[in-house]
Image (spheres, grey):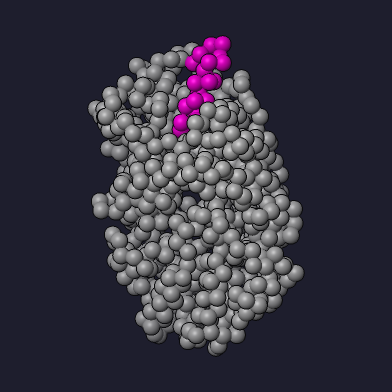
Amino acid sequence: MRILALVTLVAACSGGSKSPSPALPAPTPIEQPAPAANATPAPAATTMTLAGTGIVPAWLDRAVDPCVDFYAYSCGGFLKTAVIPGDRSSWSAISIVNQETEEFLRKIIEDAANQPGDPAAAKIGAYYAACMNEPAIEQAGIAPIQPLLDAAAGVKDQKTAALAVIGLHAGGVFPFFTAGPQQDFGDATKVIAALDQAGLGLPDRKYYVESTGTMPHTRTVYLAHIERMFKLLGDKDAKAAAADAMRIETSLAKVQQTDVARRDPHAVYHKVDRAGLEAKIAPAFPWRDYLAKLGIPSVTDITVNDPAYYTAVTRMLGTEQPAALRHYLTWSILRASANHLGKAWVDEAHTMAKELSGAKQTPPRWRRCVQRVDSDLGELLAQSYVKARFAGSSKLRAVDLTKAIFGAMRGELESLGWMDAPTRAAAQQKLDKMAYLVGFPDKWRRYDFEIVPEFAANVRSAARWELARQLAKIGKPVDRFDWQMTPPTVNAYYDPTLNEIALPAGQLQPPFFGENFHPAVNFGSTGGGTIGHEITHGFDDEGSQFDGNGNLRDWWSASTKQKFAGATKCVVEQYGQYEAVPKVKLDGKLTAGENIADNGGVKIAFQAYQAWKSQQQQAPQAVVDGMSDDQLYFLAYGQSWCDKSTPERLETMAHSNPHSPPRWRVNGVIVNQPGFAAAFKCAKDTPMNPGKQCSVW
């Protein structure tokens, strides 16, 4: 179901809160998909109960008419009984898998302490122990981030401000903008350097410049939060420091691209190269020193998301008062580091999590430390997880299911009435070249940095190491086997420049996928909600602009492009009418790609399931506890999105997340599914069978 390259085009699909700062990229492929006429995604038992199929009976609400509100029918029982834990902003099917995964990883990590002869286990255990050692963290205070704070404190003029930015970037903290590798949109065989906008502490630029819903209140809470952070640091004029930091962030927000604009790959790709940066776009910034400090002194091929942004940033470095720049840079450090320091810092950082997500408590220490180990040493930690949770024929079943969905997409391309022959041939070529990764990497990553007893120092070391690893890709051949999610991650992604999908082992777990689930359930949840979804991303409003080799190229005829735009407009308008919370509607343009992928994925996987059934010598059980297998298919998809969320989380999603809230990821999809009304015998003009359907793929 469900990262974000440096320039925000990789489509991941769980729909969690968007990270405030851009991540560094790195995608992946493995084996080329081939037709799978006789694929067998999962065996069906001779006689199954509803629970045995993989459906959770207690999550249903049979009192609801599925033709009126399918989400309430699929998940009504769940919504009535689910309790959102105090340290979370939602409780969902995904949360359940995440919790089971975290508890299992905790056991792996704690067992690692008893394996002194195993270097990998020792590294994991030492990192976790440092994270769990709260007395040592309290005693260290801010010492682990003092070198970064000293860099910010040295700002006296434009030159020293630039030097401070360089020092912070080299340390893994990214005020103003961020740097990393990116496949060249114009030549996907090359990895070039890329700069992207960054430096905001709120989830999206909208929070600084708009006043929809609770945004004005959030700004007030945020400003007070910054002030309290400066007080923790001991700043005697914390109020003025907070005002400076907020003002500079607001200035940045005003010149940054909107998330909707960034959905157009052409808007975020500007090959300016080093000479253009140094001579035209931002000549006042010492790019030679910057690139040398980052360890890439000879780089010449550079792209930026928006040339005007870097002109504005360098102007800001020259016109802002040095004290204001010191405050902004210091705030950038505190914001990035607070959760790695003592309890007072962690508690204060949580005030913004509470405002934006509704989570009442900080997560328990052990869970935060498990997440840090997974983030910073993920492929060491994953090896034991994969052996235990993705053994046997799990990968084979997942690969077979993937091949079946690819086969259905081929059929869909052949039958699309709105696509002309030349465009169809190019689309088929793209699909034939689309690769996939399943479960875990063939070669495990090594983590060549030292673990010390000081937790915050380990976090900084991990950040510097990962930055260096990423930057080292520039100018090298594309590594198509470098996963950008760890295997236990409950998520998936499509990368347009690699033209591939990745399905981590964590996503291929119950209740989304099971070796012995009814095939309809595997097809409906993992087939439609994950595999079909990711394949469709290759042909959504963003992915469709890249060809089969991963190059940004217009391969559509004018007439087909016009029809595609019309079909996409239907989806945009449909979702733009839905409310996340009362009086806050979804942004149909921001969510267009994910909505297209949701709708297309479920439709294609349903076709794949019908084709698969027709090829079996013995069909799977047709009726289980009164439910047909087609009903099980749609129910599995619906239950994969069972979710109870706080109003704060839902509103934050509406303002900043490219995914629709779970209710609309179900009902918004179901109303467009050709097979749904027949499966549940829904009369025409009922809410789930409204007559008009939006269909892109």
| Residue sitting nearer the eye, 215 or 282 | 282
Q: In the rendered view, would you say 123 is above or below 436? A: below
Q: Which residue is drawn at 55% across and 55% down?
A: 265
Which residue in the rendered view is the most extreme toward the bottom?
156
Q: Is residue 144 left or right of residue 632?
A: right
Would residue 605 be counted in the magenta stretch? yes
Q: How many badges with numbers are in the image?
A: 0
Mostly what secondary structure, the magenta segment? helix
Q: In this view, does 434 lie to the left or right of 588?
A: right
Give the magenta-colored segment's residue range.
Answer: 601-620
| Residue sitting nearer the eye, 548 or 340 | 548
Q: Residue at x 26, y 29 (%)?
A: 686
Q: Is residue 151 left or right of residue 90?
A: right
Would residue 526 be counted in the magenta stretch? no
Q: Which residue is drawn at 51% across and 41% down?
A: 559
**Residue 252 coordinates in the image, percent (x, y):** 46, 72
**Residue 489 coordinates in the image, percent (x, y):** 54, 45
Q: Which residue is drawn at 45% across and 56% down?
A: 260
Q: Is residue 461 visible?
A: no
Q: In this view, does 634 lie to the left or right of 326?
A: left
Q: In the rendered view, would you say 205 is above or below 373? A: below
| Residue sitting nearer the eye, 559 or 447 | 559
Residue 637 placement: quadrant: top left
| Residue sitting nearer the eye, 21 or 87 | 21
**Residue 522 coordinates in the image, percent (x, y):** 49, 28
Q: Is residue 422 visible?
A: yes
Which residue in the rendered view is the most extreme toward the front?
559
Q: In the rendered view, would you say 313 is above or below 127? A: below
Residue 237 placement: quadrant: bottom left
